Amino acid sequence: MTYEQTIDYLYNSAPMFQKIGSAAYKEGMENSFLIDEHLGYPHRRYATVHVAGTNGKGSVCHMLASVLQEAGYRTGLYTSPHLLDFRERIRVNGRMIDKDYLVSFVGKHRKFFESIKPSFFELTTGMAFAYFADCGVDIAVIEVGLGGRLDCTNVITPVLSVITNISHDHTALLGDTLTAIAHEKAGIIKHNVPVVIGEAQGEVRKVFESYERAKVAANDFLFAEDENPVISSKILPSGHWLFECVKYLHLENELGGYAQEKNTATTLCAIDVLNRSQFKIPDACVRSGFLNVTGNTGLMGRWQIIGKEPKIILDTGHNVGGMEYNVRQLLSEKFDRLHIVFGMVNDKDISDVLALLPKDAKYYFTQASIARALDSGVLSEKAYGYGLHGQSFATVAGALGAAKDCANERDVIFVGGSTFIVADALGV
């Protein structure tokens, strides 16, 4: 098969959550263990860091990978979903998986995969683990796909587990309470493996503390909020964050967005834990890693500014937790008028998100180019009930074009509501 034929095979022969949602989700880990055995347990040939959470796990993964690269470690990075290119999911030192390797891997193992009928994510996780082994990585940062306990990445035994936070998302699969979701995320916690928790209060914190008593020594179970590694912070004119930290004065983080305050604290705690293990990360590498995240790892879509006059901002935040940060930051921007290009998927309760959005913005309701996209007309009708007014557009390109035509140079255009809306905007 050619590369294009191989990608088409991956997209169409295995159920893909990115395209069809919960119908692609497979309960249980039987296939994951079968694939792992078939491939010879490749993840055992290098160290791993396992990162779960409702929001922020992608940013934390990229920041950790960037810092580890700067420290001289050959670093694998497995994240999802991709925005423009499937190969974004699997990187070594920032470089996407080689096309020839991808074609060869699918061709070599195709008969086996067809015998067990894995999901898209089960198949690509096995590919990632094998690729990292064949590339001889020292360490791989692995992002959980969905939940944690039953996620197919959970075959690994990492040197560190990280859980960023807990919020309502994928409730049909993970549970409709924060404690139920926390139990699913906490499923990545392993016996005697250090753990960093980014945010957890009340009953959610009690869920994690029960795992501490059962599995991990207290001094290896860190709550970033208790450690408080960041003393103060401010946003620079460049859009970067400047942090004053307990161990790092004047630490500049390239990633914008209010959510990066919490993500930075979580990442710094993770770095401290890694420094107590076989990995040694000099202060200078922490600094350069935070300053060069996008260049080192290819991260996109996190408060990404793609235009000026008018200022155009993209962000993949798509649930209540993510949109709370986005709205708070949007309202801190200076503009004559705010324009919002907005769309969501059709398998989520969007009411709580709509209730958060500013009512005095001009809206361009749209839909991404995937089957899961919520019809823009339906979205517009629902949004009207929350005092949000605007027009409907069949494509993101059309909506963004209309926003640009309507905006003056002192306006702000925000594009978001769904990872797939951002992907389409980046492809315009």
Image (tube, grey):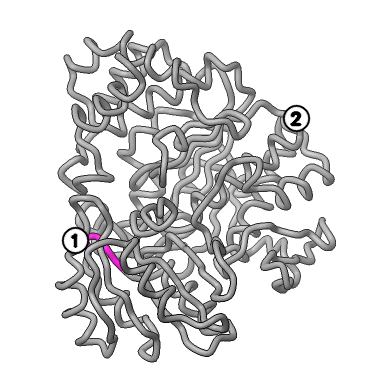
Q: Main secondary structure of the magenta part?
A: loop
Q: Is residue 389 left or right of residue 95?
A: left
Q: Is residue 67 left or right of residue 149?
A: right
381 above or below 313?
A: below
Q: Which residue is mark 1?
A: 346
Q: Is residue 104 left or right of residue 367?
A: right
Amino acid type at mark 1: Asn
- Tell me the SS state at disc 2: loop
Q: Which residues are magenta?
A: 343-348
x, y percent for residue 151: 33, 38
Residue in view at x 57 percent, y 38 percent = 160
Of residues 117 and 402, the one nearer the viewer is: 402
x, y percent for residue 87: 44, 32
Asked whether 345 falls inside the magenta stretch, the response is yes
Q: Which residue is mark 2?
A: 72
- Tell me the SS state at disc 1: loop
